[in-house]
Image (tube, rainbow, N blue to C red):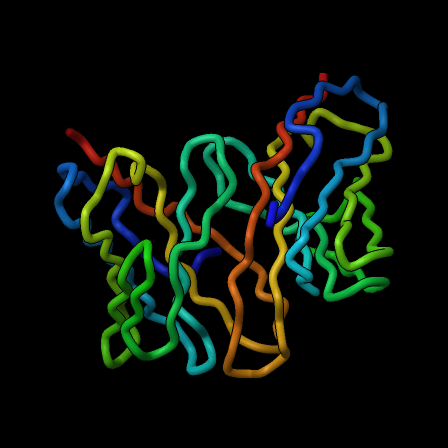
Amino acid sequence: NAGVTQTPKFRILKIGQSMTLQCTQDMNHNYMYWYRQDPGMGLKLIYYSVGAGITDKGEVPNGYNVSRSTTEDFPLRLELAAPSQTSVYFCASSYSNRNRYSNQPQHFGDGTRLSIL
Amino acid sequence: DAKTTQPPSMDCAEGRAANLPCNHSTISGNEYVYWYRQIHSQGPQYIIHGLKNNETNEMASLIITEDRKSSTLILPHATLRDTAVYYCIDLAGGTSYGKLTFGQGTILTVHP
């Protein structure tokens, strides 16, 4: 298994440009997440999805969009890049069987380092 | 904000056990104790988790006190590659989507 794969690994954008960060997982996980991590800081949840066709906002969704048309893929879209979106973006996935007393860990990709100039 | 507290940094000699403490003063009954680590420039890596009982896997052991207010992650034979930031997290099980909130963590430095 490749696990969680993110592309590209690095990208430089100009202000106002748009791009899509790709994320795919081969573990048949139902939950997927997008986080951003600014230098020296913890993770902030951007969007998450509990299954194909279902997405919801995290704590910092402004300026981003997501879609989940398949179980495997969860792309993150930046429509109008701004300098404040310079960050490292991590995609993660996990399996939840919705049992109140069980949980499974999140598995992360290696990240996309995005700079907006 | 993170609900757990950890020492900001620790050192360990290569080959020795690294014992990383965490306080979970506000943990609730359905929250698991999770440990992750982040090696420089890489994505967070899951280490281990538990609810009440002590747990062991190929990476580490997790000791949880009976009142669940504190835990200790044990790396039995630390190597240089274990140098990383280690995070302990309280995370509800089951129906919640399990949003991870990392605090400042403990910077573990393993030296030769």
Q: Residue at x 67, y 53 (%)?
A: A26
Coordinates of residue A15 in the picture (x, y in percent): 80, 20
Q: Quadrant of the C terminus of chain B?
A: top left
Q: Residue at x 23, y 38 (%)?
A: B79
Up/down of A34 relative to B64, above or below: above
Q: Quadrant of residue B12?
A: top left
Coordinates of residue B101 in the picture (x, y in percent): 51, 55
* Apparent side of residue A71 relative to residue B37 in the rendered image (left or right): right
Up/down of B36 relative to A83, above or below: below
Q: Which one is in front, B18 or B31?
A: B18
Up/down of B68 relative to A91, above or below: below
Coordinates of residue B45 in the picture (x, y in percent): 46, 48
Q: Which one is in front, A98 or B58?
A: B58
Q: Which one is in front, B69 or A33?
A: A33
Residue placed farthest to the front in the image?
A: A1
* Apparent side of residue A18 relative to residue A25 in the rendered image (left or right): right
Q: Residue at x 48, y 45 (%)?
A: B44
